[in-house]
Image: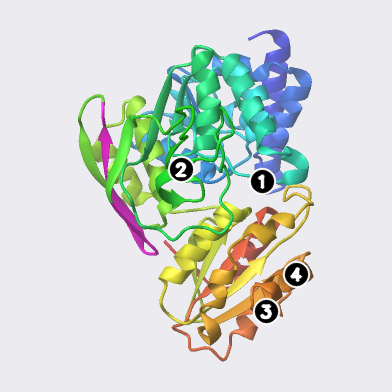
Amino acid sequence: MNVRSEIGVGLGHLARWGLRTVFRRNASQLPGRIALTVDPDIISRLAEKLQKGSIVVCGTNGKTTTNNIIASAIEAGGQRVLCNRAGANMAPGVVAALLPGSGADWGVIEADELSTVNIVPELRPKLMVLLNLFRDQLDREGEIDRVQDTIARALASSPETTLLVCGDDPISMGVARRAAEAGTKVLSFGIAEDLHMPPERVPEGAFCQVCGTELVYDYRAYAQLGAFRCPKCGFARPTLDYQATNVHAGRSGVEFDATCIATGDQVHLRANFGGVYMVYNLLAAFAAATMAGVDPKTFQRALDSYSPANGRLQHFDVDGREVVLNLAKNPAGFNQNIQLLLEDKRPKATYIVINDNYNDGRDISWIWDVDFERLADEGKSLLVLAGGLRANDLQVRFKYAGIDAQIAKDVSAALEAAKDMPKEQPLYVLTNYSALWPAKAELERMGKRHE
């Protein structure tokens, strides 16, 4: 390190100490912001201290969970990991995570898609995991081709990085195709069987990434993910390097067989947090952890002890009522949450909260692409509540879905609205980014978290 880097690291450590010790505040970004101000190249300096290298995880949905499972699995194997577990996934958050760099074996880093162009060329990871790409934060990210261009440029600036990509996602495979043409080694993962899932009303990625012809599918897992192919030019799901088969996914958890095609090794994985999308997350995490030297038994042991955090599928008990909290910030994420909710056959309530702060995206027109109509089929067995800064917009959307939704200003008000329901009937709280932390804090004050 040069003098500027040393000063930046020192000031970053001081800021971390002050935030945590004096102010009792989160130190996931400010120390990194200070260090970057002193030395704009500090990511590359800190990367030099990682003894075995780094893994970067990006994608629209699931990156925090996947990233943290990879980190936990590598740690369970006895190696030291630096990780931005709280989800601070832009350059300042990455720097803050890497500041304690001396002696670490791996950096396991979640990266915002548009920030990959600032992170990947500096970090030069051994592996980059691309989970999926959906429209998200439309006013910040723009259309999906801008996100694709950014990730492709990031990979082109780090030629030694291997790309592990969801082969079931044609949009992600559009990035992988460009990366492979530029010399990047590409490996793929996906679900190798038909799960017979209900189709979504507005699937994304309907057209070929090469010639623009409408894609055809042998089957879909969810959204645009599935066994796709172009009938005109041959663009198609690749032969998968890591496959999930014998998949069982539901509200209570998932289990499946994970197979590495190159070696023929197969292992049965299970986790007590559910959804088809979680199969993809776990398969990607398994593949990445395996490449980092983690054996299957150690990976499963890490899964057994892993508890979803940061509001992702967290369960609380509030005065005897189960409350399930999860992040939902775009049509694909919401539709998967709706699927999980519908798999719970009990009468229930759901409180859906949408804000339009900067980190949410001010454009919420995407709520019209969510399959809320599926909730209308539940009739009187489902109480629907709307909240957040855009609660009235949600009410209008629900009206057109055939749902009469009440407004609740917060989780306490939602629980009050559900007070006449029997205690054994749960409340599902689905929020976007800026609403997640207040809801989580409120639930932690009111009830007990289920581990």
User: Disc 2 designates what residue?
Assistant: 216
Q: Nearer the viewer, residue 2 or 128?
A: 128
Which dot, 2 or 4, sits closer to the camera? Answer: 2
3D distance between C-alphas at marks 4 and 1: 19 Å
**Residue 248: which quarter of the image?**
bottom left
3D distance between C-alphas at marks 2 and 4: 37 Å
Question: x%, y% of residue 17?
Answer: 66, 36
N-term-proximal mark, 4 vs 1: 1
In this picture, is 102 found above or below 450? above
N-term-proximal mark, 2 vs 1: 1
From the viewer's perspective, is 67 left or right of 285?
Answer: right
User: Disc 4 designates what residue?
Assistant: 391
Kind of residue at badge 1: Asp
Quick one: quadrant of the N terminus? Answer: top right
What secondary structure is found at the residue carrying circle 1?
loop
Kind of residue at badge 3: Ala
In this picture, is 331 found above or below 292? below
3D distance between C-alphas at marks 4 and 3: 10 Å
Q: Dot 2, crowdedness within 10 Å: few (<14), some or many (≥20)? A: some
What secondary structure is found at the residue carrying circle 4?
helix
Kind of residue at badge 4: Ala
Which dot, 4 or 1, sits closer to the camera? Answer: 1
Residue at 70% x, 39% y is 143
3D distance between C-alphas at marks 3 and 2: 37 Å
Q: Dot 3, crowdedness within 10 Å: few (<14), some or many (≥20)? A: many
Residue at 61% x, 55% y is 331
Q: Are marks 3 and 2 in contact (CB under 8 Å)?
A: no
Kind of residue at badge 2: Val
Question: x%, y% of residue 413?
Answer: 68, 79
Magenta-tinted stretch: 247-261
Question: x%, y% of residue 41?
Answer: 69, 15
Q: Which labelled disc corresponds to residue 136?
A: 1
